[in-house]
Amino acid sequence: MTPNPFSHMPPPNTLRPLPALAPLLLAPLFLAPLTTAAIAATATPATPSAIAAATPAAASTAAPKPIRFAAAKIWDAAPHCAFTDLLAFRGRHYCVFRESVSHVPPKTGGGDGKIRVLASTDGDAWRPLALVEKTGFDLRDAQLTITPAGRLMLLTSGSIYDRGALKGRQMFAAFSDAAGETFSAPQPLTLPAALRDGWLWRVAWHDGAAHGVVYQTPSQTSGGAAWLVKSADGLRYDIITRLDVTGQPNETALEFSPDGTLRLFLRRAAKDAAGHALLGRAAPPYTDWRWSDLGIRAGGPFLLTLPGGNTLLGSRDHTEGAPGTALFTLDSQDRAVRLLRLPSGGDTSYPGMSVVGDELWVSYYSGHEKPRGQAAIYLAKIKHADLFP
């Protein structure tokens, strides 16, 4: 087995540039997660046997065309690195994620998450730029956007734990300077009183306002519920409407089209089909929604339209039993169709996606190369033409 050159990352203050990402071939579907050897950094494509192992078993008149991409581990300086986002700003690429000792703080105390900010000019060599933290809060699920004032806004949830038990939540935002070099201390968000302790998972800016979906769990609101909200400054939010969805609505990705239409990729936590993710569409003022059942369970959703008009969904993938991180597109009935499953397994998902020239870059986390309970950060690069020939 070829050794994986990224198995042991140096500490943050000694991070070395990574080798160029390794070219891979994957069929749109495969039966099992790839091995370490399949993602080792080499200068040659995967062997025919590796490609054959990635070919789906479903009957077909022609073999599916493999999807070529490159993937590499970019960070694992903490035991558990997870929940990523990715954004380009002023000629650099930013990857943000949570660092901690475990998925949630342990019952023994300590282990509150901090948000690591990495920067890169080429997606291969990443340097630590900032570490956002707040005493007494477990920061997690950081999301990046660019404000109308031309600053980076880092949205994050601060959970309050007492010996492993969740006691409360406060949403925060940190803002960069104009150059994107430094970040402010986390500033608390003000949500409507009815949504106290709700989770504003992601925002998207449109017409000078930040829009997002705040959700509450069944322990907070009977059956769980979600509300579309907006803010002029990213800190103080007002309700636009309560979303007419059941099934314990949860994390929600947003995307505005040039004509102002808003689409939502909404995760649901209920069991069975009631927990299928939904795709929502609405025109301004975003109070009349049309929903489609995507036919998949989601986790860490991301929604993006490529320059050619194709829709991409990024999410945890449950279609093979064991979890993985995958990219999906939509069929003519707005059902999710899996394009490829990235090298991943165990504790994994929460991709960020960014269009970089003729490539799609995808950040995500995975535990498939780590001891149980740990995870690292990965970056994949995929040509648009390989995703949609």
Image (tube, rainbow, N blue to C red):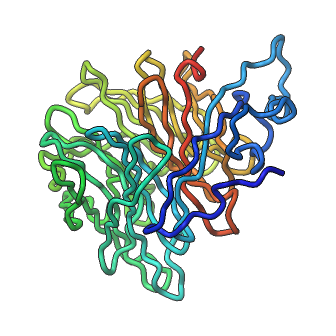
Q: How many numbered discs sit on the rendered protein? A: 0
Q: Is residue 109 above or below residue 53?
A: below
The quadrant of the image that shows the C terminus is top right
Specify whether residue 52 is in view.
yes
Quick one: 177 or 371, which is closer to the camera? 177
Query: Position of 132 compared to 331: left or right?
Result: left
Q: Is residue 268 above or below residue 296?
A: below
Kindly identify the residue that appears in the image at 49 percent across and 36 percent down.
361
Find residue 26 and report its image quarter.
top right
Kindly identify the residue that appears in the image at 53 percent across and 88 percent down.
108
Query: Position of 111 compared to 92: left or right?
Result: right
x and y percentages locating residue 263 in the rendered image: 37, 30
Find residue 371 and report its image quarter.
bottom right
Specify whether residue 268 is in view.
no
Quick one: 128 or 248, which is closer to the camera? 128
Query: Position of 62 compared to 29: left or right?
Result: right
Query: Position of 371 compared to 265: left or right?
Result: right
x and y percentages locating residue 283 in the rendered image: 27, 24
Q: Is residue 91 above or below residue 137?
A: above
x and y percentages locating residue 167 in the rendered image: 39, 78
x and y percentages locating residue 372 in the rendered image: 69, 68
Looking at the image, which residue sits at the far bottom?
108
Kindly identify the residue that appears in the image at 75 percent across and 45 percent down.
33
Q: Is residue 187 above or below residue 65?
A: below
Quick one: 223 or 109, which is closer to the camera? 109
